[in-house]
Image (spheres, grey):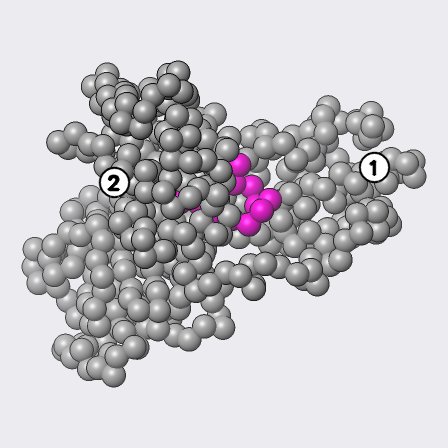
Amino acid sequence: MYLEPFKLKELPFRLSPDPRFLYLSKQHARAKAYMESTIWFTDGFVVITGEIGSGKTTLIESFLKEVPAEVVVAQLNQTQLSAIDFLQAVLVQFGFSPFKMRKGELLSTLNNFLIEQYSAGRKVLLIVDEAQNLSMRVLEEIRMLSGVETTTEKVLRIILAGQPELANKLDAPSLEQLAQRVRLRFHLQTLTEAESQAYVQHRLEVAGAGDRELFAADTYPDIFRYSGGVPRLINTLCDTAMMAAFTADRGVVTRADIASAVEELQWLEYAARPHRHAAETPLSAAVAAHSSARSHAGTPNLGQLLVAADGRTVQEVRLRLGRLVIGRTRDNDVQIDSRFISRHHCQVITTIHSCVIEDLNSTNGIFVNSNRVRRHYLNDGDVVLVGKHELIYVDERSSRARAALSDTVPGVRTLVAGGAPQESEAQEGDGEDGRAPPG
């Protein structure tokens, strides 16, 4: 193999989901933060979707390595199961031998286990990978399990990860009750060209390359062109290219080695390949996809979000299908640089029929009509107070969209006294949810 000539300690582009090799792009870091939030908050599911090879499983493995000791985890990867098989598989993960139990016994055993763990001060987390393969009946069983609760909180935390078809299933009318319990959805996009280069360099560094440049600078555009920024495809291409460089007795991978690898793999450029996502993903999956409005540039505007401060509009954001995350840091879709805003403060989810704003467990919360809310269906003209800023919603589906804004300052309405945020600043070191880290 090529380890010795390249002076590497291990293979840098193995396909196994080794968390040590995880490259945290901005979107992978956000997805991981959403997964971490399930440890502290129990009010709903977290759903992570992504195309094949986007890094979902590696992300899960990295997350699991950092789960606190008091969290009891059940992880399922085989998901083509009946409802009985699923319940048995979960109990096996918790140390039971449930194969002679009837369904009623399975449910009773699982419910008792959850309550016992809660009483002992332990948290219970269920992670289901490849969840797009779950049948509707199994998804309904998961919904029922999520309802196990004490007088104060749910006792089972749930993360579902899968391909985009998972979002389609969750949007089915028969699973409306489950979909309503989904607190956060996040779709992992492919890496950008710059992220693809950083990804390759990161894996080489972990494998022992240090600061040595083992890929010539002009190879990275070709790597991106043929891999499309899909991590698994990058691994396959780069591994094959390093073998080509090794057989040619070169210590650096060149464009010729990339071309040789592409020929051996019989690949077309990524953009020229047929992609099922374009043909098969319906509108509901697009809604669940990664939330930047920029990614829906071809869709019509469904509304506006006016960001106002001190009586004047400081930003105008067009609302298209998808999710818009609002917060203090630059990795948000809408950045509000204020000490009263948490890192990821809230999100606005726009569908063809409605627009919803949700608090992402921020420090100072979101207020509508002086009342703090976690989730609110926006109506034309609604004003949402976030920190010291106002978000004014303009619904362009309605002919009265702009008529609703008729206060002293054009385009800006204010909430009455009493809806002001707590006079606490969002901490620079706060957690993903905008609160000080627990404990």
Say which quarter of the image contains residue 64.
top left
Q: Earlier in the sequence, mark 2 or mark 1?
A: 2
Amino acid type, label 1 = Met
Number of the label disc, if any, that sits on residue 243: 1
Q: Is residue 134 visible?
A: yes
Instruction: Give the magenta-colored segment's residue range.
Output: 47-57
Whether residue 350 is in magenta: the answer is no
The answer to which of 416 and 168 lies nearer the viewer is: 168
Give the left or right position of residue 253, taking residue 202 as reference. right
Q: Position of residue 164 (x, y in %)?
A: 49, 52
Q: Position of residue 287 (x, y in %)?
A: 41, 60
Give the left or right position of residue 343, taking residue 30 as reference. left
Q: What residue is at 15 percent from the left and 67 percent from the top?
A: 414
Q: Position of residue 434 (x, y in %)?
A: 30, 42
Q: Position of residue 307 (x, y in %)?
A: 29, 66
Give the left or right position of residue 251, taking residue 229 as reference. right
Amino acid type, label 2 = Asp
Q: Is residue 328 visible?
A: no
Number of the label disc, if any, that sits on residue 131: none
- 10 lies above or below 297: above
Where the C terminus falls, by quadrant? top left
Give the left or right position of residue 44, taking residue 136 as reference. left
The answer to which of 134 and 333 lies nearer the viewer is: 134
- 193 lies above or below 152: below
